[in-house]
Amino acid sequence: MVEVNHPDLSVRRQCELLGLNRSTFYYEPAGATPEDLRLMRLIDEQYTACPFYGSRRMTEWLTRQGEEVNRKRVRRLMRVMALEAIYPKPRLSAAGRGHKIYPYLLRGVKIERPDQVWSADITYVPMPSGFMYLAAVIDWYSRYVIAWRLSNTLDGGFCLEMLEEALRSGCPEVFNTDQGVQFTAEAFTGRLLSAGVAVSMDGRGRALDNVFVERLWRTVKYEDIYIRGYEAVLGLQRGLARYFAFYNQERLHQSLGYETPVVVYRGAGATRA
């Protein structure tokens, strides 16, 4: 834990030694009422298990668990959590006003090498006194997590910061996201285009177009977040740093022939900037 009153080291130096951004130290989890936080935790766990649940099914499921909720409340909470059911429907993540939507470029494309396709997404992280948002960039071929960031808001700045870190380590041919405002913002898409990267976005009602990141969220939550029960943002940051190091370097993936993501990503000749 960082000690603010350490006699010899400033907060800035302590964060540098821990590999943290200094702003992370000052994060406070986003707030909500204790009852809403309890319901959001239930919704998050059920959504992670059944990502095809929309507000109607989620309301019915909660009711069967003995919760007195209506659909309006569940829909509001799912909106705060940035959750969308994975099934075709008229409208998915809303882009910002005036933001350009790019076509989905990967239908029928065979993924056969590292740095061919990267994608990014955001997920909700429950905490006892609030919640955070977690974003990550993953390489489709190797499942390697290239960069990740935490934020207590859905402001796009933390996604752009994550993108900059990812591009310092390499450059994909195609970068895929959903149509959320963080990813349709000109600052985000413009940075990709300036790096010579083709921008791809999921079609409406096609969250499975970004299936590798959806699987990553399930893995991270069931193998770390839910069982650790992080109480403070700094503990969450440090715990996720440990977990992603394990995920990349030690966790054997059946889909990779029981290799680790780092072996497949680096061993198959990924390009470096």
Image: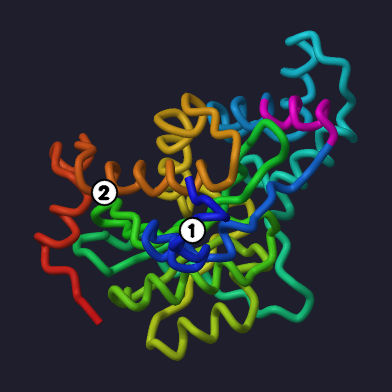
Q: Foreground: 144 or 116?
A: 144
| Position in image of residue 226 (x %, y %) | 51, 28
Q: Which one is earlier in the sequence, the residue at label 2 or at label 1?
A: 1
184 over 58 or under it: above or below? below
The dot on residue 204 is none
| Position in image of residue 169 (x %, y %) | 29, 73
| Position in image of residue 175 (x %, y %) | 42, 70
* Callouts 2 and 1 close, C-beta under 8 Å: no
- In the image, the segment drawn in magenta is 33-41
Using residue 224 as the reference point, say whether residue 246 is left or right of it: left
Q: Nearer the viewer, mark 2 or mark 1?
A: 1
**Farthest residue toward the bottom?**
194
Q: Residue at x 43, y 41 (%)?
A: 239
Whether residue 254 appears in magenta in the rendering, the answer is: no
Whether residue 40 appears in magenta in the rendering, the answer is: yes
Q: Foreground: 260 or 25?
A: 25
Q: Foreground: 37 or 7?
A: 7
| Position in image of residue 198 (x %, y %) | 42, 79
Using residue 93 as the reference point, say whether residue 18 is left or right of it: left
Q: What residue type is labelled 1?
A: Pro
Find disc 2 in the rendering and name its residue.
Answer: 248
Find disc 1 in the rendering and name its residue.
Answer: 7
